[in-house]
Amino acid sequence: MIRSLSTKSCSRRVAAALSSSCSGKRFNSASTTPTPAPIPAAGDRKLPPLSPRTRDFLARLIRVDQAGELGADLIYSGQHAVFKRTRPDLEPLIAHMWDQEVYHHKTFDALQTTHRVRPSVFSPLWTVAAYGLGVGTAVMGKEAAMACTLAVETVIGGHYNDQLRELVALIESEAAVAEDGRASEELRELAKMVSRFRDDELEHLETAVEHDAEKARPYILLTETIKAGCRAAVWTAERF
């Protein structure tokens, strides 16, 4: 199954680290701007201050994920603009995935603003490239558009898994020195949010496979080119 992108062991570690505070709530794909979970601070609980390295990791996480969700939002926007005219039968499917990406994008926009994390300096480039990719693959047809989704979500799903591993390590190290044996609520909420967003992205990947992504031509060239572009964008947005 596609969802086995090394997510099972990662999900088990997330569940174990968060088990003391999981509320069972599900994020809604609402159009309203979400309330961001703050970068953790010691507050009234006796937790040691975050190290500069940890704060830098959290700032990079917000910056790169905001850039990624901006890109995903615009890819689906471009595809939707084409398919609502050429393939109205696909419009509800694209609209559903786009709605989820809009929510992800707004969430990271709010986090970025709240915590004064600078955006990627290449955001204008991500904007143009992502919308162009969405329009271009949709013009090529349904299969190419789904292959685009498969390629993008493969990279982003793996990227979120990498972040979750680092977040779980932070939670475990913070809990080890906390008087009550628990990491900050804010850090645990951030990990739960990333886990949920990861699951949404992998749902999109599975949807793409179910809708003939692998029938796109030229499949390998198209998907590997998009994956390479996504990896380069992730590397760049984390740093600049």
Image (cartoon, rainbow, N blue to C red):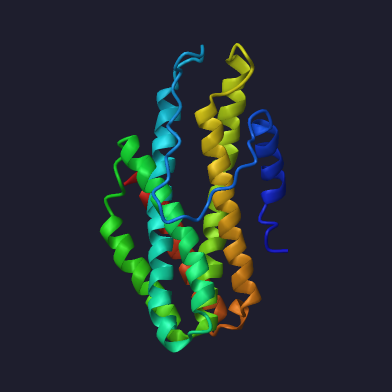
Q: Please give the name of the residue rendered at 43% of the width and 82% of the height, measured from the top-left corner.
A: 84
- 47 over 165 or under it: above or below: above
Give coordinates of residue 94: x percent, y percent.
Answer: 50, 72
Q: Nearer the viewer, residue 122 or 127?
A: 127
Compared across the picture, whether 12 is left or right of 186 comes to right
Q: Position of residue 25 (x, y in %)?
A: 60, 43
Task: From the viewer's side, name the closer residue of 74 and 124.
Answer: 74
**Taking 48 as reference, is 210 above or below it?**
below
The residue shown at (40%, 40%) is 60
**Residue 209: which quarter of the image?**
bottom right
Q: Tell me which residue sits at (43%, 49%) in the image.
A: 65
- Residue 85 as seen in the image, left or right of residue 4: left
List x then y, in percent, for residue 240.
Answer: 31, 47
Q: Is residue 180 above or below residue 197?
A: above
Q: Residue at left 52%, top 80%? A: 90
Quadrant where the N terminus sits is bottom right
Q: Nearer the viewer, residue 95 or 65?
A: 95
